[in-house]
Image (spheres, rainbow, N blue to C red):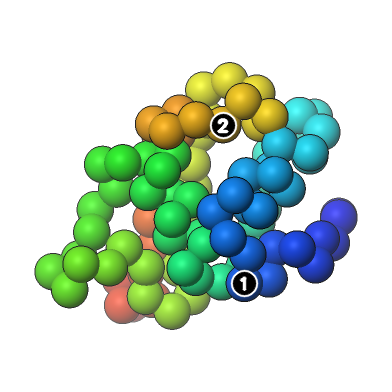
């Protein structure tokens, strides 16, 4: 487990830098942070992510699972596939 203080309230570019600096193995990354950076990151990686009626993608405490095509240091627009988006209101 790595802890990187740059993630808290980070901009899109800072999040991309943190991800790009992370070793590719073991192949999974669990990134916890705040908006607006995380929402911007998801929208860049997965432009077809389902935006709600209010124009927002995230509410408080969301979980997004993304599959990336390519290396983490090669993030680009549309390089992610949204596998799952869980919002608190969706839970029973």
Mark 2, other Cα within 10 Å: few <14 / some 14–19 / many ≥20: some
Compared to 87, does 14 lie above or below? above
**Camera-side residue: 53 or 91?**
53
Q: Where is residue 35? Give x, y as percent.
A: 49, 70
Q: Quadrant of the C terminus?
A: bottom left
**Camera-side residue: 83 or 76?**
76
Name which residue lies at 56% across and 71% down: 34
Q: CA separation, marks 2 and 1?
A: 20 Å
Compared to 85, does 44 lie above or below? above
Compared to 4, does 22 lie above or below? above
Q: Is residue 89 visible?
A: yes
Horizontal arrangement in the rendering, residue 68 relative to residue 42 (left or right): right
Horizontal arrangement in the rendering, residue 87 relative to residue 54 (left or right): right
Residue behind mark 2? 75
Mark 1, other Cα within 10 Å: few <14 / some 14–19 / many ≥20: some
Q: Where is residue 43? Give x, y as percent.
A: 37, 49
Q: Where is residue 29? Give x, y as percent.
A: 69, 45
Residue behind mark 1? 9
Name which residue lies at 49% across and 30% down: 76
Q: Which mark is residue 84?
A: none
**Camera-side residue: 63 or 35?**
35
Label 2 sits on a secondary structure element that is: loop
Tell whether label 1 touches label 2 (CB within 8 Å): no
Name which residue lies at 81% across and 60% down: 4
Q: Where is residue 49? Give x, y as percent.
A: 29, 48
Compared to 52, does 46 lie above or below? above
Name which residue lies at 42% across and 33% down: 77
Q: Quadrant of the N terminus?
A: bottom right
């Amino acid at each position: 487990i790595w802890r990187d203080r740059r993630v808290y309230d980070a901009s899109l570019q800072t999040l991309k830098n943190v991800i790009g600096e992370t070793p590719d193995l073991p192949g999974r990354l669990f990134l916890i942070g705040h908006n607006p950076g995380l929402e911007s990151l998801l929208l860049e990686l997965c432009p077809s992510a389902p935006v709600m009626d209010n124009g927002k993608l995230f509410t408080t405490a969301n979980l997004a699972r993304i599959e990336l095509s390519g290396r983490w240091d090669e993030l680009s627009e549309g390089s992610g596939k949204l596998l799952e988006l869980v919002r608190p209101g969706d839970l029973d």
